Image: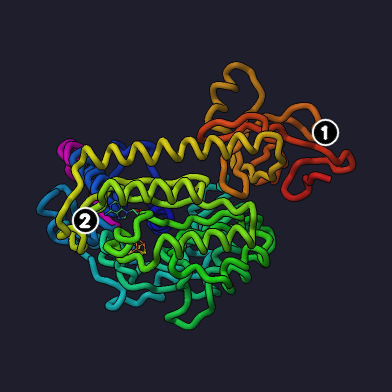
Amino acid sequence: MNVYDSEKILFHLVRRGYEKTLSVELADLVVLNTCTIREKAAQKAFSFLGRLNRLKQKNPDLIVAVGGCVAQQEGKKLIKRAPVVDIVFGTHAIDRLWEHISRFEHKRRRIIDVKMSESIDETRFWEEPASKAGTDSVKDSSVTAFVTIMQGCENYCTYCVVPYVRGKEISRRPDSIVREIEHLVKKGVREVTLLGQNVNSYGIRQGFCSFAQLVNRINSVEGLSRIRFTTSHPKDLSIELMETFISCDKLCNHIHLPVQSGSDRILKLMNRRYTSENYLEKVARLRKIMPDMAITTDIIVGFPGETEKDFQQTLNLIREVEFNSLFAFKYSDRPQVPSARFSEKVTEREKMHRLQQVLALQEELTSKKHHLLIGSLHKLLVEGFSKKHESAAKKNHRIQWTGRTQSNIVVNFTLNSGFDGDCDENLTGSMVDVMIEEAHSHSLRGRPVYINPERKGLKGDKYHVA
Ligand code: 5AD
Ligand code: SF4
């Protein structure tokens, strides 16, 4: 979500004559977009502000604007803690940043804007025609893009700061979302990831349409190859949405379904409003509908009061579901959240020990799953050169490409015999079929397969397995 917001900020600034610099040392204006979901993220923001402080001593005209969730959370206090900051703009003030910068340039007086949506005209941000919106700043070569479809959350999980810093749940109008996606496609984007804290409740309050209906509409955008979304709250995952995986051919067979814990006692303390049994039932249903559905999750270890027994239940759930991958986090207290006041805090040492166990177990599961893929065929959306490309190019080796499977696994490959296309052709944005040959812990290696000799060229959807 912050990547998307940063794109919007960049676009507004570029439109007004600012240029992106190659390094922060060269800038006249630095905009820091922050995250406060976990303590570590907020600490990162503060240590970066320390660096800006040193820069400002050398260049007193430097303007520093801080936005995002830390700004929303701290407001005035942020300036006290970090006097280097000139402008504080909260999560609902992105569209006003430009006014603030111009006012600061003239008056050199600090500005704090942390007003939430009830007091602003929401439509100003959402309703700007796509041709003028932040999507213009998407890099020309990007084939994937994020699209925020809603903001805020009212689920109030007891550990989570989001409802306090992102505010009430507000959905964008379906027309505006579709227009933005059509615009992105014209700029070369082939895959969009729809973003919301809980996409399952999209449009309900405003009475627009259901999330499943929205995905159906987006599915008919011409030129778009793939749709992803994140995040779904397990309690709201509907049968209608599960069936969308069948009805929408562009919807990738991957779902991120954060479970957080395998212990019903902890889930209750977290206010997640489902049990491990409910969760497993939904997973079983999803797999019945789409047997090759990739399921990923988020896990919090060391929630206050989490005993060894609770933790073992989390490990058991991970083993039972066999997630394709997961993100695991050590619990951290966040300002305002109820769990910050819960007793029986787990020690840092124990949290680290549990985190390592979760990561080790998942590594085993992912590695097993990746090895099972050897010999299977996958359609990749090519995103560009692989990370290893530079070193391969230096050694005069072939171009290394990278793409993702529908289930979101990174696959690297080089063009080799079997192709009648030009080996130097730019494959970015193309769909290429590969046979998986090697499995690594975080990626796969494949060999492009060219089966139908009638078909020439490798561009876009023209390239198919016969
Ligand atoms: N401590 C640790 N992890 C957290 N998350 C959210 N709040 C906290 C917290 N206070 C994790 C959850 C969520 C992900 C985005 O961040 O797992 O799904
Ligand atoms: Fe936070 Fe997600 Fe819970 Fe909302 S649903 S409160 S964003 S963890």
Residue 167 percent location from the top left of the image:
30, 69
Q: Residue at x 79, y 27 (%)?
A: 417
Describe the element under mark 2 as helix, strand or loop: loop
Left or right for 315, reference 157: right
- Circle number at residue 334: 2
* Rendered-image quadrant of the N terminus: bottom left
Please name the residue that numbered disc 1 is placed on: 420
- Circle number at residue 222: none
Q: Which image quadrant is residue 278 in?
A: bottom left
Q: How many numbered dots are placed on residues in this image?
A: 2
| Mark 2 neighbour density, 10 Å: few (under 14) some (14–19) many (20 or more) | many
CA separation in Å, label 1 and label 2: 57 Å
| Mark 1 neighbour density, 10 Å: few (under 14) some (14–19) many (20 or more) | few
Lower position in the chain sequence, tag 1 or tag 2 = 2
Q: Nearer the viewer, residue 449 or 395?
A: 449
Q: Residue at x 60, y 54 (%)?
A: 293
- Residue 84 higher or lower than 266, as above or below: above
Query: Furthest-right residue in view?
Result: 454
Report the span colored magenta.
53-68
Q: Which image quadrant is residue 286 in?
A: bottom right
Q: Which image quadrant is residue 154 in?
A: bottom left
Q: Residue at x 29, y 49 (%)?
A: 32
Residue 331 percent location from the top left of the image:
26, 49
Q: Nearer the viewer, residue 370 or 176?
A: 370
Where on the image, by quarter, is ligand 1? bottom left
**Three-letter code, disc 1:** Asp
